[in-house]
Amino acid sequence: MTDATSQGGSRLTAADSRTKKRNASEKRFRAYGLAAIGTGLFFLVVLLTSIISNGSTAFMQTFIEVPVYLDPEALDPNGNRDPADISKVSTFGYNPLIQNAVFEQVQDKGIATDYEDAGDMRALISASAAAQLRDRVIANPDLIGETVDFQILASSRVDGYLKGRVSRDSITQDRNIDAGHLDLVDALREDGTVHKSFNFAFITGADASESRPEQAGLGVSMLGSLFMMLVVLFLALPIGVAASIYLEEFAPQNKFTDFIEVNISNLAAVPSIVFGILGLAAFIQFAHLPQSAPLVGGLTLTLMTLPTIVISTRASLKAVPPSIRDAALGVGASKMQSVFHHVLPLAMPGILTGTIIGLAQALGETAPLLLIGMVGYIATNYPEGVISGFMSPNSAMPAQIYEWAKRADPAYYERAWGGIIILLVFLLVMNVIAIILRRKFERRW
Amino acid sequence: MPVLWLFLIVLALAAIGFIAGRMRVTSAGGERPHSLPNYYGWNVAMKVMAPAFLALVVWLLVQPMLVDRQVTAGLAEGAVPEGSTLGLVMSDVRRVAGGLDTAVSLGLITAGDADAMSAADSDVRSLLGEAGVALGSDVSPEVLEAAQRYRAMNATGDFWRSAVVLLLAVGGLVWGVAQSHGTFRARNSVETGIRIILLSAASIAILTTIGIVLSLVGNTWHFFQIYPASKFFGSFTWSPSFGGGSELGIWPLLWGTLYISVIALIVAVPIGLFAAVYLSEYAGPRMRAWAKPLLEVLAGIPTIVYGLFALLTVGPLLLSVFGRDGLGWMQAGTAVMTAGLVMGIMLIPFVSSLSDDIINSVPQSLRDGSYGLGATQSETIKQVILPAALPGIVGAVLLAASRAIGETMIVVFGAGAAARLSLNPFDAMTTVTAKIVSQLTGDADFASPEALVAFALGMTLFIITLGLNVFALYIVRKYREQYE
């Protein structure tokens, strides 16, 4: 001990090798923790960058803008502008007009090309352009005989070339397009005939067949998701709130109540695909509801979302202090009145927040939808009304994204990423609303 | 009478009952009534709606089953052609009956014609074609006859349904209005009704579980009747062929599931745990406020996004390193590693949030005691906090494992379709969930073992995840009780 006092404080302040080791290990441990958080955030950044970099191109689409002469002889052979006659002309009647228009444009601009026939222009033009022109003419028969400026949807190869997905190397084996076409595209692009503009059809449009990725849009499946969410909202919210009120306010302490609680906590952890099996067996096999209908999807997702809503609703009911209930009972309210007149309104912001988060979860869920048949076909038709919106086959946003990702044409991958951006925007909006609700109405008792 | 009309009529009766009940009490003078006037109204409305709607729902569920059974029993022996099943014939019958209904409502034929029509002297197929019901083949006399019987029974059923429901509604109305006088305790009656509604809402959780179990058990039972359970659990090959002669052994699928889950946990548990430790022990309030929600964003992203990320970003990336141009271990972008890595990313916030809660619930006195003995912060964490939190953390890891086993979209996109028992993590393998999807979304006949096997797989999945959850919750709960 004399040793220690003689050297004064230096022995205490100078770190010995053991302390150094301990301090180093402390620093290392801290660094591990930081590294773990950093890795997690790094993954998040990589995920978001890859979504945005791959998907943002889906919102731009290549168009060819040329004046199209609507030849009366081809479109209205009888010359009487009768809508019935005009609609007898199929898209085959329009194809040559569009091809001629593009070919004339090429010649007018004096672009040197080996192609001598207007039919060779087909590779540049989407197969759906004729149908779009036809729709426009049928809607307005007076256009016939005039020359209209028409934004022709370019084929997906041309679109891919402008976006860098298709290159001269990658098309050597491609029967749909030649290098000469790409030369043409380069030339037309320079004078502005071929250009990219915002792709509204991707957000509002319908799905297209496998060979026309340039036409595919998310609009119809968005409606499918909307109808499903309506079912979930109108079933899961009242049932979930009623169940929570019972469990939190009225349920006696007994085996049956325990059984319900165990069931709810287990259902919250059942894999979503099992709910798909339930939906398939109960709603389609047993109740003979129509396959692929948003109603069935909504019912299945309701069962899946219920535990989430019940758990969050119970938490917000629990947060209302007992003094509120006691005060209501004290002035003569019945138990039921105290709950419905006082506790429930106070818990409402929390309940709504939980419901929105439950809805967001349901909106992004895919696996159950695969089993009840919301994939595997092409959702090209908008629902005709509210009833058909619920009952007729449709897709849903995540199911549509799954479908696109499964298709062979890489052009569909871009659509799938783009679809994910739209889906995430919806989820973001819902979560932000939930957070704002919570911030605004949250009460500390 | 269509159900919608019936529904609206009952609603209208309920509204009338509400007003009548309320008025009867308010207009009667004398002593103050027991309850507020609205309660008398609601009492009547409840008595109109509850029995009527209950009867309607039960009827809607039971009638199709009874009619189906009767018509099926009435089908002649020879009505089921070679290569078809009773189920297919019955769906034909339903389609023909539905087509006849449409034809009658479009005015193509009269109702009497539809009942009297025979397959021999009229072209039913083209008639139904006009009504918008396309049939694959001509309608056989047996099917037409069954369809006519089906329609007749449904018509009778519908008539009695309307009669019973309306009778109950009117009966309820009379009963309720008769009750409405000042001494009747209307509030108690209404509150009992509401209580029953609340209780039945809570019971839906039980019904859902029963529904899951029944749909799994029923179809699994069917499966084991046409495919021996010993082969399902005993075979090491999975090679379904829709032509018949499939081998449906579960082991390759279970192996793929476990392999992918283990890789996911190897990624998620260290990262999640260290993140949780740092956030709860080291991070200041400001860092906590932004790092925690940002990590949790990973949990809010739908799994389809992770699936696409695995297929289109992580798979090609791994392939460029481990594929033919690199180390040569990997054949294609879809592999156990791809799915496992991405699933691990998905599970990070799951592990970190749960562990964070658990570490936070370790009492401060334990930390103070350890610091008082001169331990550094990391020593305290390693030797005091983590051991104290261990049961909870094990519970969290088990919950994460159950998540990983039940995850579908990531493995559908990331893991490949080949069922094989291999040790190489860069091989494509498949999982129980991926096979449930592929067996049920194909064109397989619903009664074939190749489709029904999905239910047996679902059953296996349900039991494994349920077991893990129950065990994990048990551990977590037991641990929590120690400190509260």
Image (cartoon, coloured by chain):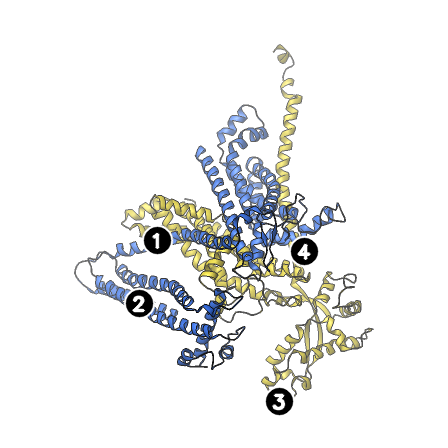
Chain colours: A yellow, B blue
Mark 3: which secondary structure? Answer: loop
Q: Position of residue A260 (x, y in %)?
A: 40, 48
Which three-letter amino acid code belongs to the residue tagged 4? Ser
Numbered disc in front, either 1 or 2: 2
- Residue that numbered label 1 is attached to: A340
Numbered disc in front, either 3 or 1: 3
Structural distance between the alpha carbons of marks 3 and 2: 61 Å
Tag 4–tag 2 contact (CB < 8 Å)? no
Q: Residues within 10 Å of mark 2 (few under 14, many from 20)?
A: some
Q: Position of residue A244 (x, y in %)?
A: 40, 50
Q: Residues within 10 Å of mark 1 (few under 14, many from 20)?
A: few
Is residue A432 visible in the rendered image? The answer is: no
- Residue that numbered label 2 is attached to: B164
> Which quadrant holds the C terminus of chain A?
top left
> Which quadrant holds the N terminus of chain A?
top right
Is residue A149 visible in the rendered image? The answer is: yes
Q: Locate residue B264 relative to residue B483 in the image: left or right.
A: right
Q: Position of residue B170 (x, y in %)?
A: 27, 67
Q: Chain of mark 3?
A: A
Q: Which badge, 1 or 4, comes first in the chain's sequence?
A: 4
Which label sits on residue B88? none
Structural distance between the alpha carbons of marks 4 and 3: 52 Å
Mark 1: which secondary structure? Answer: helix
Of the pair A316 and B220, the residue shown nearer to us: B220
Which three-letter amino acid code belongs to the residue tagged 1? Phe
On the same chain, marks 3 and 1? The answer is: yes
Mark 4: which secondary structure? Answer: helix
Which label sits on residue A53? 4
